[in-house]
Amino acid sequence: MSQQTAITPTRAQDFPEWYQQVIKAADMAENSEVRGCMVIKPWGYAIWELIQKDLDRRFKETGHSNAYFPLLIPISYLEKEAEHAEGFATECAVVTHHRLQARKDPATGKTRMIPEGELTEKFVIRPTSETVIGAAFARWTSSYRDLPLKINQWCNVMRWEMRPRIFLRTAEFLWQEGHTAHETRDEAIGEARMMHKVYEDFQRDVLAIPTIPGEKTEAERFPGAEMTLTVEAMVQDRKAIQAGTSHFLGQNFSKAQNISFTGRDNTVQFAWTSSWGVSTRMIGALIMTHSDDDGLVCPPRVAPQQVVIIPVTPKADTADAVIAHCEELAARLRSQSFHGEPLRVVVDKRDLSGGTKKWEWVKKGVPVRLEIGPRDLEKGSVCLQRRDQSTSEKVFKPEAEVVDGMVALLDDIQQNLLRKATEFRDSHIRRASSMAELEANFSGEQDADWLLVPWDGSPEQEEELAKRLRISIRCIPVGSMGTGEEAPCILTGKPTTRRVIWARSY
Amino acid sequence: MSQQTAITPTRAQDFPEWYQQVIKAADMAENSEVRGCMVIKPWGYAIWELIQKDLDRRFKETGHSNAYFPLLIPISYLEKEAEHAEGFATECAVVTHHRLQARKDPATGKTRMIPEGELTEKFVIRPTSETVIGAAFARWTSSYRDLPLKINQWCNVMRWEMRPRIFLRTAEFLWQEGHTAHETRDEAIGEARMMHKVYEDFQRDVLAIPTIPGEKTEAERFPGAEMTLTVEAMVQDRKAIQAGTSHFLGQNFSKAQNISFTGRDNTVQFAWTSSWGVSTRMIGALIMTHSDDDGLVCPPRVAPQQVVIIPVTPKADTADAVIAHCEELAARLRSQSFHGEPLRVVVDKRDLSGGTKKWEWVKKGVPVRLEIGPRDLEKGSVCLQRRDQSTSEKVFKPEAEVVDGMVALLDDIQQNLLRKATEFRDSHIRRASSMAELEANFSGEQDADWLLVPWDGSPEQEEELAKRLRISIRCIPVGSMGTGEEAPCILTGKPTTRRVIWARSY
């Protein structure tokens, strides 16, 4: 017996296609005609706005200020930091001209616009802004008194992706990029670690995504970084998503761009810099972590609407009373506060059938649905459904109880989603101690668990193995997961205390 | 006797240079090494964030949703609406390649990055998004039930300006662009007018800029629009700044891009569209409207800090008590609300002289400065200074009175700035009825009043006159200012009831 689901195919049938269909059914985003670039539609963008608002507060609380830097980066800036430049060279959109000239095509009679005004200095559209922000930092820094500089930028960036996937990997995406400059090495490392923690906390507490925080191996580091910290999310096909990174850049960029200052000892020194960022990619991780075969499941803290009230109006003579009552209930709910914000409540008064409305909100992932009909009005009751439970499960409750318990209910849903995701993750990270286990785990095309293994291979050995099995070292987890008793590296056999996670990834 | 000012030169000496120096002294923004592109520094960006927050609320209250569309516009999109394309063709940044290739220069041994991967379909960086959003609207619209579409986008845009001026005219700027599609002509016109009013209200009530709302003449319309509404600000050199526009686009874009729908009568129809936008240019208008020879004067509603408290600590043994008291005072002020937001208050504890600190905050335009020293502590008094009054004017007041009166004081400053700007504007708009008056008014290189005149000239005559006197028709004011008894057009002599404003502009 097959149960009908709102999304076709199901996760089990075809996870990548299910993902596209969830996005479509929730009306979150779509591919545009511009290759690899998406249109983020209001429901998807509202989630991004909620993400921004929460993160922005965390950035300001940790002493950062927002600013804005040019979209275009002179190619000469990139040439200054070779490793960084090479890391992004294959995916840069290049601006070469600064006007168009209309020309009539003699063959077709149609007007064509032709690029004109070739630029002497050509530009790339920022794939990330270390170079252009570094140039500003160099202008702003002359004494140790000018440090630290702690700047964040919310903006768009472009990386010409050959295999785009909506939210996860698009030619243009939205993100924030923090950039800081410090007097000492320790302070810059402390900054990178602090923001790593901010990302971990945010994703756990707001997105209900229990990431594994860790450090990237040398082979997987950001181009130009001395240390790259990452938060790795496991989604429901057990692939890993790098959901945020924080880099200690040493003095690489400050030397390339002359971010120097006169120190306390009167010598001229180079600053120590960091950078860190998260992007709209997190929305992809969010969808793949929580959603089910009926569509998006949105954690309450980032749900554009947390409660939808659907008036059930079978008879014309009671319809007005039901709708008025729903509006009044919405107002009472909105007067309550959930994590410092008024509850987001919508009354769906559209002239559509109750079933059509219900399924639309199911697919949009709204955490709580309330239905109220004429009989509920008489009884003072409400029919309540939770998005994180079966769509057929309905609970009838006294209205006063629903109102009084709504904040606690939303918190419970938030916690439940985190708990489920954590259990899933923990049941799919396994320890392994041999190459045979690793090869068996990743032999198929199918989903595969993450393997935590003793590892002491070189970057070259890592890349060779990664390529052969189409896997990668996601991170050396921070804390106890990333170390252990001395054990032989699964590849080299050399004893090591280091543990790394190998996985398939997006 | 010359009085010393914090900004050199003064407004009277050299207004354009004064403007640059105000921005520098307030640390708001700077030119970058990327031609025509600015870096918006934290103080300037914080003003933009406050502008965004207030406007965004107004957009949502009037039924709009935020979304995000691609940065890159295929040139073929532009070719569809010829007038629009030609309007922006001369200032488009063109993307022609999608990667860089590192090549060693044999002569110098240095690595150069060379554009590679020429694109078959080339792109411009959006100068505005009518075309790319129109393409999305065409996908989203099939029935009248899909309308209206009411979308707003916060983003960056590029227009390759040949004579950039920070905030006012830069190659890249930040803005919002609203785009809507409607079933009927009247509804689209109503939308354009509604947003015109939103801009006027916002600028008056939040930026304390009393604009003249009006309609552009045909010659000054947005490329592709049937009607362009504008809000025109007069700044202190009496030049006009177009501070926001709202366009009724008729069916021009919907026909070019096939935004069509099946109507209530079952016929296929084209939608009626509007677009409207304001940008970081408003910050330029804000600076030029209110600031004085001591620097920025920031209206309280968009001041990143509304109150600065400067502890005066002449003696080490009382310093801690003074600072603790200032912190406590700040906390009490922050617990108050000004237009729905907690008061923004900073305590300047830096180890700098009181004078240095004071002048820094003067130049940054903070509305209220409080100084507290050991003697004030004893007396329970505070020294209060308003930015909108002379920098030498100090008032000593009981602290309780200062705390209780702060919100009213900020409102008074806000109103005072609006009143001063309105008086200035009104005293520099004059009625004229002949070409002789017009020519006399605009004969010199100096600042000139705005002239309100009867006008019935053709677009060609308007352009000829505009070019000759380096002026333009800013608008046909809405309401009674824009019409009058029949009077001869100053150019053609033909009787007309229409009145237009001629002025110099940025």
Image (cartoon, coloured by chain):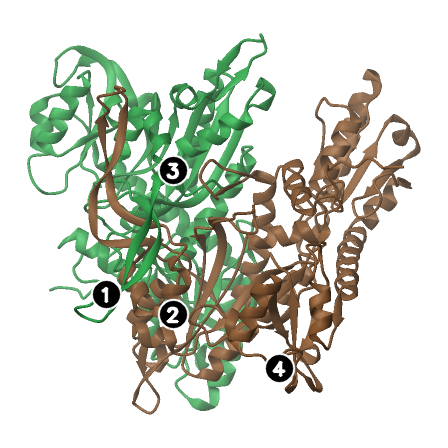
Chain colours: A brown, B green
The quadrant of the rendering that contains the C terminus of chain A is bottom right
Vertically, is B62 above or below A66?
A: above
The disc numbered 4 marks a residue on which chain?
A
* Residue beneath the point at 39% across and 78% down: A251
Q: Position of residue A235 (x, y in %)?
A: 69, 56
Q: Are marks 1 and 4 on the same chain?
A: no
Marks 2 and 1: which is nearer the front?
A: 2
Residue occupied by mark 2: A83
Q: CA distance from mark 2 to mark 3?
A: 31 Å
Q: Quadrant of residue B176?
A: top left
Distance CA(mark 3)–CA(mark 1): 45 Å
Of all residues, the one furthest to the right in this rendering is A379
Instruction: Give the distance between the C-alpha atoms of the residues marked 4 and 3, in whole angstroms.
Output: 51 Å
Residue labelled with disc 3: B73
Q: Secondary structure at mark 1?
A: loop
Q: Which numbered marker is on residue B6?
A: 1
| Mark in front: 1 vs 4 | 4
Say whether residue B170 is visible: no
Which label sits in the foreground, 4 or 3?
4
For label 3, count other residues whose C-alpha is less than 10 Å away and answer few (under 14), some (14-19) or many (20+): many
Q: Position of residue B193 (x, y in %)?
A: 43, 26
Q: For mark 4, what is the residue?
A: A492
Q: Nearer the viewer, residue B66 or A185?
A: A185
CA gap, disc 2 and disc 1? 46 Å
Query: Label 1 near label 3: C-beta < 8 Å?
Result: no
Q: Nearer the viewer, mark 3 or mark 1?
A: 3
Instruction: Please tell me whether mark 4 sits on a helix, a strand or a loop.
Output: loop
| Chain of the residue under the numbered disc 3 shown in the image | B
